[in-house]
Amino acid sequence: MIQVNKISISELEQKAACLGVNLPIEQTSAWADYQATIPGRSAWGCVELVRDGATIALLSLFDYETHGYHYLRSAHGPVWCVERDDALEAEALEALAAYIRKTDKKVVFCRLAVASEPASVEPVLSTRPYNQTVVIDLAGGTEEDILSRMKPRGRRDVRKALRESPAVCADETELALQSFEEHYDVMRETGERDGFVPAPCSDYEDMIRILGPEHCRVYAGRIDGRVVTWSIVTISGTRAVRYYGASLSETMRQHVTDKLVLFECVDLFQNKGCADYDMMGIGSDFAPELMGLNEFKTKFAKNGVVDVAPDRDLVVKKTFYRALCAAKKLRDRS
């Protein structure tokens, strides 16, 4: 039988460290501090799943209030401390749903990372989950080490950028902390080109400031002193994640972002102690709407595509959740 115990975020981090588990950034106290500044979100608490006296999983949960109801979110959680299998995951989710149902009557569902498809979960009502990503192995940490593990197309594009692009790449974290406006202008153009509306500039500034330089870096490429491409990279333990990126259309053929990614890989290994670099999601049969990301991301690692547990909704209040699904279908038709 699986027990669900409430713990503090510091206890979660301590238990993970004792068990040798590298927490995703979203499961850390630094992320909790950042999320607490976003309207409509608040820390709900952390829990430990225990079986036969041993910790099997950890997760930090946030309460999201939207459209008059509440749901919980645990990005990249549960963090498994033992080898996961479908039966164990199904049992753990049932125990978690029962605990939430007993603890907080407001919660309709809990969105978390679920590798299998037990009866207790449904596809997410919103957002675009993915079940594959690209992870770049940073071992060795030199340009040649990184290039040697790219696909031929990736090596070609990066080497072309190294030869021909005048872009100068640098870690601009300190500069971005002073003002993110110049970088944000590039994000505006990226959004117009790719069909999305970026978050307000203050959201990126808050993320950089609150996570702090230990957990968040800003890299940029400049031509003639002007920002033409940039990335916001999170760091947790030995894992780096390319959380956001933007580039100007006029310089895309010069592969300036490819040059920047190589610079980031080398710096993350040599100066930040990272062992791998997650490019954060690609398309698949599960997420066909993300296929447009694959050409760029997959070229950086010939053996780097890995499966990850996608977000799914763990249903807590079945009747209420069915009503939300029906309302969504009506909106989609209109």
Image: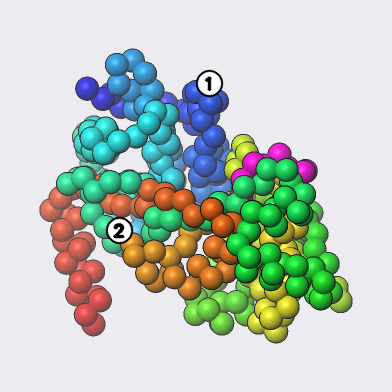
Can you say which quadrant of the picture contains the N terminus? top left
Q: Quadrant of residue 289?
A: bottom left
Residue on which disc 1 sits:
18
Q: Is residue 32 visible?
A: no
Which one is closest to the eye, mark 2 or mark 1? 1
Residue at image position (73%, 63%) is 260
Dot 2: few (<14), some (14–19), or many (≥20) neighbours within 10 Å? some
Query: What amino acid is found at the position of numbered circle 2 in the picture?
Result: Val
Find residue 120 and report its horizontal and vertical position in percent: 19, 45
Residue furthest top as drawn: 53
In the image, the segment drawn in magenta is 270-277
**Residue 27 at x, y percent in the picture:** 49, 40
Is residue 157 depicted above or below 150 in this figure?
below
Q: Is residue 231 visible?
A: yes
Residue placed under numbered mark 2 in the picture = 124
Secondary structure beneath label 2:
loop
Q: x%, y% of residue 165? A: 80, 74
Q: Are marks 2 and 1 in contact (CB under 8 Å)?
A: no
Q: Residue at x 69, y 81 (%)?
A: 253
